[in-house]
Image (cartoon, rainbow, N blue to C red):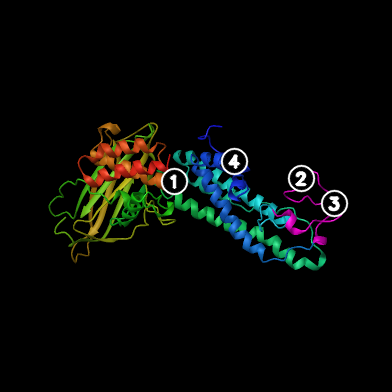
Amino acid sequence: MNPSERISPDDPRLTMYALGEMDAAERTAFEQQLQHDADARAAVEEIRRTVAVLGPALEAEPTPAPQALATDAIIPGWEAGQTNRATTPPVDEYRRGGSKLLRFPSLYYSVAGLAAAAFAVFFVVRESRERTMLGEPQAVEADLAVAAAPPPPPMIMAPAPADNAAAERRSEAPAKVAAATARRARMAFERDYADRFYSTAEQASSTFPLRIGRDGYAAVREQLRRGERPARASVEVAEMINAFDYAWPQAEDGVAFATLLEETGAPWSNETRLVRVGVKGVGERGAIVARGARAVVEFNPARVRAWRLIGFERGSETMGVRGMAPGETVRGGDTVTALYEIVLAEVPAGEATLATLALSYRTGDEDAERQLTRRLETRGAAFAQASADMKFVTAVAAFGLALRESPMQAPVGLQEIARWAEAGAGGDEQRRELVELVHAAETFLR
C-alpha cells in the first residue's frame, strides 16, 4: 500500500490504533500512513479524547453481574460463533489487552458509534473545503452540524430489573459524550478554519489587528532549534509573519500611517492569488500616533469571488469579519502585516480594483475621526516577480500552517517552502535562520 494514500474515514484501523490494539508490526506500518494524512491523525486524537471522556463516566457505574447479561450475547474479542453458552464468562475473560474500558458490550458499541461520529466530522470537514472556495462558507458549518449529531443509541442488553437506575444512567452516557464530541468538533472547526474562505457575495469586508504579538515565533524557533516538534496549538501563524522586519514606504506628511499593498500569484495554485497588506505607525518611536484605529479591507466582488485571511487563529474570535476588531492605540514603529489568499471572479467586470484598505483613526485629543484609503489594482504578476518581502511572508505563512497541520495549509512540501524563504532571505541573518528551521522540521513533517 502506498504510504501517502489517504486513509478512509471509516477504516477500522483508526479505532484499533487509537485504543492500542495493534501489534508492533501493524502499528509501525499504520504510523507510516498516518504521517501523510493530517485528517486521519486528527480523527485518532478525537477517538482518544472521546474514550477519555466516556471511560470515567462508565467506570463509575457498577459492572453488570454475570446473570444480568443474556446468555446468547456475543462478547467482543471472542471467536465468531461462540454463542449460546450455558454460563457467561467472568468479566476479566472478555477484557481485551487488559483494557478496563471494554468491560461490557454496551461500552464497546458506544465507543464504536462515537468513533463513527468522529470519522464523519473529519470526513465532512475535509470534503467541504472545496465548497468554501466556491463561495459556500456556510455549507461547511451546516455539514459539520449534521456530522456531529449524536449517533443512534447503541443496542445494549437489558439489565436485571433491580438495576434500572444504573441502566438509565448508562443509556444517557453515550448521548452526553456525543454532545461533548460535537462541542469539541465545533471548537476544532473554529480553530482550524479561522482562516477559511468567505464569499464576497456574502461578506466582502475583513478586519485585522493593528498590533500583534511576536513571542509566538520565538517559542517555535527555540523548540525547533532543540530538535523538538512545536505543539500544534502553540503555533500562531500571524505572530510568525510579524516577527520579521519588512521594507516600508515613507508616510505622507500629516498622515499617521505608512501603508503597502502587494498582489501576486499564489505559488501553490493557479486559481488563487495572494494579497499582502501592511500598516506601520510615523513620528517618534513609541509615541502615540493614533487612537481608536481600525483597519478594514474591502474586496471588490466584481473582481474577487472569495477570500481568506491567513493565520489569524483566535478561535471563534477570528479577525476575518468586519466589526470584530476594536479600535486600537497605535504607536510610532508599530507594524502589522496581513496576508490574504483570494479567488478571482470567473468573468472579471468593472474596474481593476481588487481591494481597498480603509484606516479610520483619531490623532491627539481630536474627537473627529480621520480616514485614510488606499486601493490595490491587479497587475496579474506571477510569484516569480514578487518582491523579496512577499516571497518571504508567503514562506513563513506556509511553514506556520504546516506546523499547525491546518486543513488550509499549502499543498506543498517543506523543500519548496524553504526555496521561497531562501528567495526572500537575502543576507538577513534572521531570515536565513528560518530557512534552516524549515529544513530542520523535515524530520517530523513530510
Q: Secondary structure at mark 1?
A: loop
Q: Is residue 132 left or right of residue 210?
A: right
Which sits earlier in the primary sequence, circle 2 or circle 3?
2
Q: CA distance from mark 3 to mark 4?
A: 33 Å
Farthest-out residue, front: 24
What is the x, y in percent for residue 235? 38, 52
Report which quarter residue 57 is drawn in.
bottom right
Amino acid type indicated by mark 3: Arg
Magenta-drawn segment: 66-95
Callout 2 crowding tier (Cα within 10 Å): few <14, some 14–19, many ≥20: few
235, 372: nearer the viewer:
235
C-alpha gap between disc 2 and disc 1: 40 Å
Q: Is residue 52 left or right of residue 135?
A: right
Mark 4 belongs to which amino acid? Glu
Q: Is residue 74 magenta?
A: yes
Residue 74 visible in rendering: yes
Which part of the image, by quadrant, shows the C terminus? top left
* Closest to the observer, 76 or 277: 76
Q: Residue furthest left?
A: 253
Of 443 and 186, the residue lying toward us:
443
Up the image or down, 93 lies above or below 409; here it is below
Residue tagged by mark 4?
26
Is 422 displayed left or right of 33 in the figure? left
Point out which mark residue 79 bears. Answer: 2
Reading the image, the residue beneath label 3 is 85
